[in-house]
Image (tube, grey):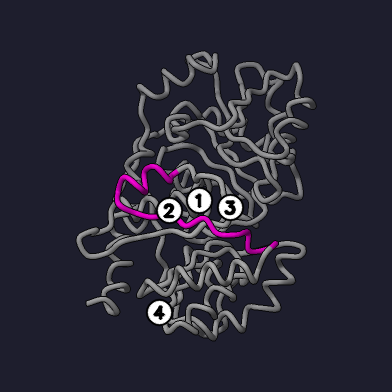
Amino acid sequence: MGGIERFLMGMYKNLDRTRYQFDFVVHSPEENYFEPEIQEMGGRVYHLSPKAKHLFKYKKELMEVMKNYHVVHIHSSYAFSYFEAKWAKQLGKKVIVHSHSSKQLGKKLLVHQLLKRGLNSNIDVKCAVSREAAQFMFTRNSTVKLIFGFDIRKFVFSKENRDAIRKKISVAPNEYLVGCVARMDDQKDPLYTNEIFKRLAGVRGVKCVFIGDGKYKESIMQQDQGSGIIFTGNVREPEKYLSALDAYVLPTRYEGIATSIIEAEINGLRVYSSQEGTPSEAKISNNLTVLSKQNVDEWGQRILADREKEPHRTVALQEYANFDIVKCTRDMEEIYNQWLS
């Protein structure tokens, strides 16, 4: 359940479904986490062949689907979506490309560089979740609409959730809990997070928690045996776990918008993020500290120094109004409306 999926479902729930309908294309045969909910709201999910393995079969299947729609809205992390945009234009469809990432590595970066110009020549409206994501996906001097949102009210601090989650994971009320809510994959750099946690876990009155799953989880758990670091795995309501924390750490390598950083700011947490992974749009509150990854000791020292400061968990939600999913959905409907009215 990634950030793009959550964003799409947030829009779908707030969409004027008397005028618009979302249907979805996925590249795997397995049922998606959100599929039952989509079907309950009248949506369809098309399971197509894996694009990277069966490009021509995928093209045939996708062309058959796209011919039934007015608008093709492509949510993408790099320019491999050139193919969907080109095929949609061949069918005479209006094409929106929504950029969700500001960087790629390795083979994906090479593919992106090769296909970026071709992608841009097949787009009617360009959208992005941040300025950095726009610069990465679109050619210079492009007109780009910045559209991104989520249910900001879900992330407001709750004393009830704090007490319940701390009891669940065996953290005392007076202990200082430092956590990371993220996939344990290359992008989020959990190995670096673990180095920070190892510097904190031995301090009296401090505990650390990884909330999430991913390919590095098992190896990190083996490293941390006996350290007291907590691993929850994936959880259904991660926003409740934010209220249990006192500080949030995310030394990510890159982000499109860094949703989790903004969610933690809304919760009133002290937030520590990397220079590389903090888009300008995420820098909202004075609780956010942006640090270099050149010195891991500095992260631990700063977190411990801030521990003595008085916490302020109440925030002014109007400061985050640009990220309200209702506003975001209305902005998106204005774009759809120019073609469907």
How far is disc 3 from disc 2 in space, using C-alphas?
A: 20 Å
Considering only vertical position in the picture, is 215 above or below 21? Answer: above
Q: Which mark is residue 28?
A: 3
Q: Nearer the viewer, residue 64 or 110?
A: 64
The three-letter amino acid code for the residue at tag 4 is Lys
Q: Which mark is residue 3?
A: 1
How far is disc 2 from disc 1 in space, using C-alphas?
A: 6 Å
How far is disc 3 from disc 1 in space, using C-alphas?
A: 18 Å
Q: Nearer the viewer, residue 162 or 223?
A: 223
Circle 4 SS class: strand
Q: Nearer the viewer, residue 53 or 6?
A: 53
Q: Which residue is mark 4?
A: 94
Q: Quadrant of residue 65?
A: bottom left
Image depth: mark 4 or mark 1 in front: 4
Dots 2 and 1: beta carbons under 8 Å?
yes
Left or right: 15 as drawn, with respect to 221: left
Dot 1: within a 10 Å radius of its alpha carbon, few (fewer than 14), some, or many (20 or more) residues?
A: some
Considering the image in quadrants, where does the C terminus appear? bottom left
